[in-house]
Image (cartoon, rainbow, N blue to C red):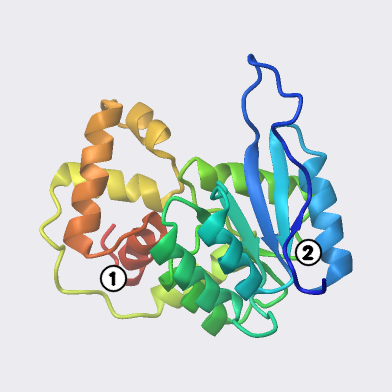
Amino acid sequence: MPGAGLRCVNPYILMSKTETAPLTVWLVEDYAPFRNTVSRLLNGTPGMACTHIFATAEDALRSLKSQTRPAAILVDVGLPGMNGIDFLTVVRETAPETRVIILTAFEDDDKVFKAICAGAAGYLLKSADATQITTAIREADAGGAPMTPSIARRVLEMFSRMAPAKTDYGLSEREKLVLEKMVEGLTKKEIANVLDMNFHTVDAALRSIYSKLEVNTRTGAVAKALKEKLV
């Protein structure tokens, strides 16, 4: 049925007890040729499985209510019906553990800014190659915020044009160091290693940073830090 969610594979069939479950990914893309190409790429990547593909955001949201939630979702911005950014907002509210990565042809500042503010875990252009896409999924799953280089530059330029805030939100020196490393794109484990901190100490610092900055996601914290020149 057109527009209905399709199962790509069942990654758990014939999986031995010693094997690690693959990183599950859903794909929301209305252009069938590109959708099929990306799903084949993901299913051909060791340790990764595209378990569901959808032509519309509405179909994906219906499945999200009844199916096991994936580790990540790749979604286009320009979809029929609900657009990708509105979809992202709903997923962030209903399945906050799922990382949503924008994969689109749109690179205008307005869409990039809205996606980041909505909590996108990453923003890739469809011109990204196979390695960039699969690497970005793993990076997002590990807590990073992958972006196509040209998008990353635009983000930095957007926020650099904005006026700095007059407050540091009461961040401690340790929290400022952790936030600085977050902006650099380091994962929690990498931050702990670089700053010679216990992993749990870094985790506690992150929770405190989110609370003080009044954000709910890593990308939200990084966006606010760049916008208000906190680091």
Q: What is the C-alpha distance between the residues marked 2 and 1? A: 31 Å
Q: Nearer the viewer, residue 21 or 149?
A: 21
Is residue 36 shown left or right of residue 15?
A: right
Q: Nearer the viewer, residue 9 or 216?
A: 9
Q: Amino acid at mark 1?
A: Glu
On the image, which quarter does residue 107 sit in?
bottom right
- Residue, x 55% and y 46% (percent of image)? 71
Q: Is residue 122 visible?
A: no
Image: 38 above or below 229: above
- Residue, x 66% and y 44% (percent of image)? 135
Q: Position of residue 125 (x, y in %)?
A: 70, 66
Residue of label 2: 127
Q: Position of residue 88 (x, y in %)?
A: 51, 69
- At mark 1, the secondary structure is loop
Residue of label 1: 228
Q: Nearer the viewer, residue 167 or 118?
A: 118
- Residue, x 71% and y 48% (percent of image)? 51
**Which residue ends up furthest to the left in the rendered image?**
170
Q: Amino acid at mark 2?
A: Ser
- Residue, x 43% and y 40% (percent of image)? 187
Is residue 14 shown left or right of residue 177?
A: right
- At mark 2, the secondary structure is loop
Image: 166 above or below 40: below
Q: Position of residue 110 (x, y in %)?
A: 53, 84
On the image, which quarter does residue 147 sit in?
bottom right
On the image, which quarter does residue 220 sit in?
bottom left
